[in-house]
Image (tube, rainbow, N blue to C red):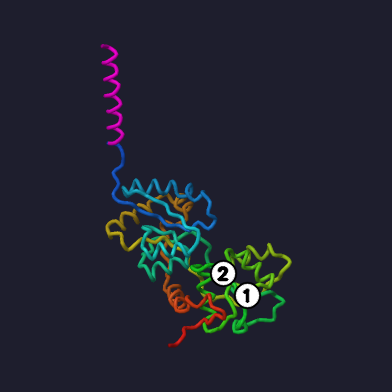
Amino acid sequence: MVWRFSRRLLLLNLLGLTVARCSSAPTYRGKLTIGVINYDGDAEIINKYAKFNRYLGEKTKASIQLEPTFNENKAIERLQAQAWSLVFAPPGLAAIAIARSQYIPIFPLVGVSNLRSIIVVRKDNPIRELKQLQGKTVALGQPGSATGYYLPLYNLYGLTLGEIMFAPTPKTLLEWVADGKATAGAVSLAEFNLYSSQLSQTQFHILHTDPHYVPPGVVLISPTIKSDRVESIRKAMSEFAGVSAQEVGYVPNGKVPDYQYMISVVERVKLIADQLQNQPVQLFKKTT
């Protein structure tokens, strides 16, 4: 009899623990999916956002899901579908999201200030003007990159190139120029300073420097989120500890940059985007 009583008491205690756990579980009000580009494809991105995700989930009572992608192409697909609630977007991707998918910038990202796009050739190459790239092979960065894709295409608008090669990394792009696989290549000035020193056997010449500074990337919020929800998310993120916010990559008290010029660049390049795989490549809108 004592054994039966103890067994029944044990079952009641276990049931009580289960109910207590269920009652203390958070009540989620929807899901927030955070989009980021993880170029390296490593798992460290999970740890980087773990503290922020927990904080934002507690403050907004939302289930937070991190969704990294490895390149801009996949990110553009997710933006077109408005599948991401929040996006930590580099400049080129941010311009696309604002112009085409109505995403709203709410915070600037931490990043290199005064970023510039340049086009380089080998120093022993006699080319000294952009128009001399007519009929030549030019290496660009991945679609979506402000300094390696949008701005150089904007600056080369009107030319007919022999071919465009798309480099997976800025270092690879400079190697193609060094080896003669491409006559010229487009990178950011910061990337050029970093990687050109690693190719010490080749000297480069900066053929063109875009006169505009590239705005920093931004945190974007989806237009599908209701305005009161937007404000609660913005408030929570602005109150996230400054050091912790910068570890994630945004400035909670920073001013949102002006994207008007960058958007105009994206829209003009959009007119010729379907021609870039052709040989030769006509960098102008065809008339019907």
Residue 184's disc number:
1
Q: Secondary structure at mark 1?
A: strand
Labels 2 & 1 near each other (Cβ < 8 A): no
Horizontal arrangement in the rendering, residue 177 relative to residue 9 (left or right): right
Which residue extends farthest top? Answer: 1
Is residue 123 covered in magenta? no
The amino acid type found where label 2 is placed reads Phe
The spot of residue 288 in percent (x, y) is: 43, 88
- The residue located at (42%, 49%) in the rendering is 52
Q: Residue at x 40, y 48 (%)?
A: 53
Circle 2 is placed at which residue position? 166
Decide if residue 3 is on the left or right side of residue 123: left
- Mark 2 or 1, closer to the camera: 2
In the rendered structure, which segment of residues is drawn in magenta?
1-22
> Which element carries disc 2, helix, strand or loop?
strand
Quadrant (top left, top right, bottom left, bottom right) of the N terminus = top left
Q: Position of residue 135 (x, y in %)?
A: 61, 82
Label 1, residues with CA under 10 Å away: few <14, some 14-19, many ≥20: many
Secondary structure character of the magenta stretch overall: helix
Determine if the magenta segment contains residue 20.
yes
- Label 2 or label 1, whichever comes before in sequence order: 2
Q: Nearer the viewer, residue 162 or 204?
A: 162
Can you tell which mark lies on residue 284? none
Vertical relation: 83 (above or below) 268: above
